[in-house]
Amino acid sequence: MNARVWEIMVSSFPRLLGYGLRVTLPLTALSFSLALVISVIVAMIQYAKVPVLRQLCRFYIWVIRGTPLLVQLFLVFYGLPQLGVVWAAFPTAVVVFGFNEGAYMAESVRGALEAVSRGQMEAGYCVGMNYLQIMWHIVLPQAFRTAFPALSNSLISMLKGTSLAATITVMEMFRQAQVINGRVYESLALYSETALIYLMFSTILTWLQRWGEKKLDHYGGVK
Amino acid sequence: MSMLEISGVKKRFGDTEVLKGIDLNVEKGDVVAILGPSGSGKTTFLRCLNFLERADEGEMVFDGEAYHFQAIRRREIAHIRQKTAFVFQNYNLFLNKTVLQNVTLSLTVVGKMKKDAAEKKAIDALRRGGMADKLDAYPSQLSGGQQQRVAIARGLATDPEIIYFDEPTSALDPELIGEVLSVMRQLAGEGMTMLVVTHEMEFARSVSNKVLFMDGGKVIESGPSREFFAAPKEARSREFINNILKDR
């Protein structure tokens, strides 16, 4: 590696990392929070077998899982303006990523809810609690433990997926790498560097997952 | 007036009629042993009384209020459940809660009690189950017998007028059965009204004062325990008792 490339890598690193911290991570956090809310609601509607809404949820999951994320991004960012719906790039990314991953996570949460023993619900009823109280205090916490590894998967997958936001003009880490590369033409070096920062971020998330699982295991896990 | 009057309870699962019209009268302080072979419908009957299964027909008079099983409202079910407790065969303790939290949960969430008061009450209930020394343990750290005693305490904490036991010792290792039965025996001695689906004949004979003997979804014989065990009237009852005693 010659001195010029080294110099480019050293000088671009803080810049890329900065975009990673200021844009990629918040974009991931916001999108994931949205996905989490959506997934819990969608999963609970199916778990509770709410008529009509339940079919709507299946439809949502069917459409989202059946179409590419990139196409969804383009559809909302470039397509919807023709109907008069114009959103800025960043909020568009949050909404599309949130709804996209939310569909996958809904299935993880639904599976986890269904894995909670039926007896937990019955016991809750027998001590006088109502459905929502039982869900909140008993079923959801247990389901959360079961779903946690799958949800961590989704989080890490989403972190990397935010790089697609570059295609709808969001100036996040990967797009910044493209911009720098446009000036210096050092694709191998710059994209390797970018990959390395993503790897750093996901490594930290992996640690967090391990720590979280240990925390959640306090009651001996779910039988 | 009886505390609980059940009449004409019918229940079918698909084409199978599992309860063909069950009647039962329970006075305050009664300990009713519900006996019968597997598949006789006794567990289903008990679950219907707490609406874990919905009976298709029948009436219930509880605390002077009459209810029809097929037309009961959700609010009425909640009301009845708050005055009763249910002990399951496989305990069904809340797995994500400690022993203490298992008992306080309904007090704080349903009864809107303050945490301190709820804990005090819970510890009293746990003491009656002999489990006041394991407050911070999780269910997964307890033996089956201990879990069942916590489950009984959980039921006791809400001051129920009646406790339903669904084969409370059937899932236990033989050496753990005694500790649960002794808690139940003590409750019976204190005058608690109890309905117990059980296969423990010795317990039924020595603790219950009434027997409901079921087979094939029907009541074959019901009456005072002493008479039932000393001189069963029906051939089917005699056969059942003899079979059980022969196994010993």
Image: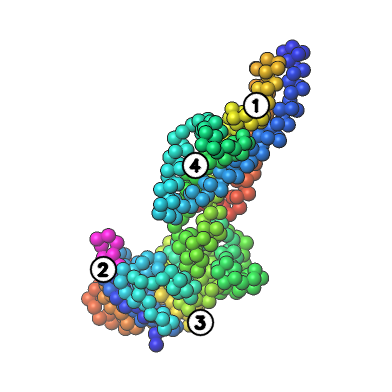
How far is mark 3 from mark 2, CA to CA?
34 Å
Separation (CA) of disc 1 from disc 4:
26 Å
| A147 to the left or right of B57 | right
The residue at which mark 3 appears reads as B190
User: Which mark is drawn over residue B216?
Assistant: 2
- The reply, left or right, for residue B228 in relation to residue A41 is left
Q: Secondary structure at mark 2?
A: loop
**Mark in front: 3 vs 4:** 4
Residue B118 in the image: state x and y as whole percent: 62, 71
| The label number, if any, that marks residue A175 in the structure image | 1
Q: Which residues are magenta?
A: B11-18
Q: Earlier in the sequence, mark 3 or mark 2?
A: 3
Residue pushed farthest bottom?
A: B1
Along the viewing direction, whichever of B148 and A15 lies nearer the viewer: A15
What is the chain letter for disc 1?
A
Q: Which residue is mark 4?
A: A103
Viewer-nearest residue: A33 or B49: A33
Q: CA distance from mark 3 to mark 1?
A: 75 Å
Q: Amino acid at mark 3?
A: Glu
> In terms of secondary structure, where does tag 1 sit?
helix
Q: Is residue B228 left or right of residue A5?
A: left
Please provide percent x and percent y for residue A79.
52, 32
Residue at image location 59% in from the left, 50% down from the top: A217
Of the two numbered discs 1 and 2 in the rendering, the one whose residue sits closer to the viewer: 1
Badge 3 and badge 1 both on one subunit: no
Mark 1 burial class by Cα count in 10 Å: few <14, some 14-19, many 20+: many
Query: Which residue is depicted at the point 61% across and 72% down?
Result: B113
Indicate the chain on which mark 4 is placed.
A
Residue A10 position, x and y percent, is 76, 22
Chain letter belonging to callout 3: B
* Residue at screen point 45% across, 46% down: A57
Amino acid beneath label 1: Arg
